[in-house]
């Protein structure tokens, strides 16, 4: 994040909307957020995806957004995570131009 964006993020920490989302470009995608690169479309990648999704749910709960996380494992091997957090903003983000 650029310094001016960091200051703005600290000032608006309680607000969470499309302006809260930014895309990392180039090598920053891997260097700053290696956890979101699953690296595999096999079992290891799926396990890592569940770990990342659950980690995001826990972060939401720690910040006071949602008091319950439900993790359901089904007989077919699929997993469902419900977190009752803020969700993912999907409106237009002027800073990202999309």
Image (cartoon, rainbow, N blue to C red):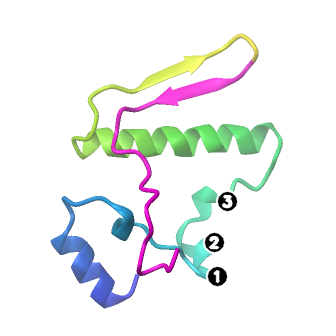
Residue at numbered disc 3 = 37
Q: Are marks 3 and 2 in contact (CB under 8 Å)?
A: yes
Q: From what the image shows, is residue 9 above or below residue 43?
A: below
Is 96 part of what is drawn in magenta?
A: yes
In terms of sequence position, does the residue under pointer 3 or pointer 2 come before the other?
2
Q: Which residues are magenta?
A: 77-98
Circle 2 is placed at which residue position?
Answer: 30
Q: Determine whether the residue tagged by mark 1 lies in a helix, strand or loop.
A: loop
- Give the side of residue 63 with respect to residue 29, left or right: left
Q: Which mark is residue 27?
A: 1
Q: Are marks 3 and 1 in contact (CB under 8 Å)?
A: no
* Camera-side residue of 85 and 60: 85
The answer to whether the residue labelled 2 contacts the one labelled 1, judged by CB atoms less than 8 Å apart, is: yes
Residue 54: percent from left, percent from top: 49, 38
> Compared with residue 84, is residue 87 higher up or lower down, i.e. above or below?
below
The kind of secondary structure the magenta stretch mainly shows is: loop
Q: Quadrant of residue 64?
A: top left
Residue 45 place in picture, x, y as percent: 74, 45
Q: Where 82 sits versus 35, above or below? A: above
């Amino acid at each position: 994040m650029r310094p001016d964006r960091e200051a703005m993020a600290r000032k608006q920490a309680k607000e969470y909307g499309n302006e809260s989302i930014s895309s990392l470009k180039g090598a920053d995608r891997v260097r700053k957020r290696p956890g979101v690169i699953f690296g595999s479309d096999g079992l290891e990648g799926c396990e890592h995806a569940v770990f990342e999704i659950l980690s995001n749910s826990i972060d939401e709960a720690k910040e006071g957004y949602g008091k319950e996380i439900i993790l359901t494992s089904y007989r077919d091997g699929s997993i469902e995570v419900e977190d009752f957090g803020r969700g993912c903003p999907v409106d237009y983000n002027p800073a990202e131009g999309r």
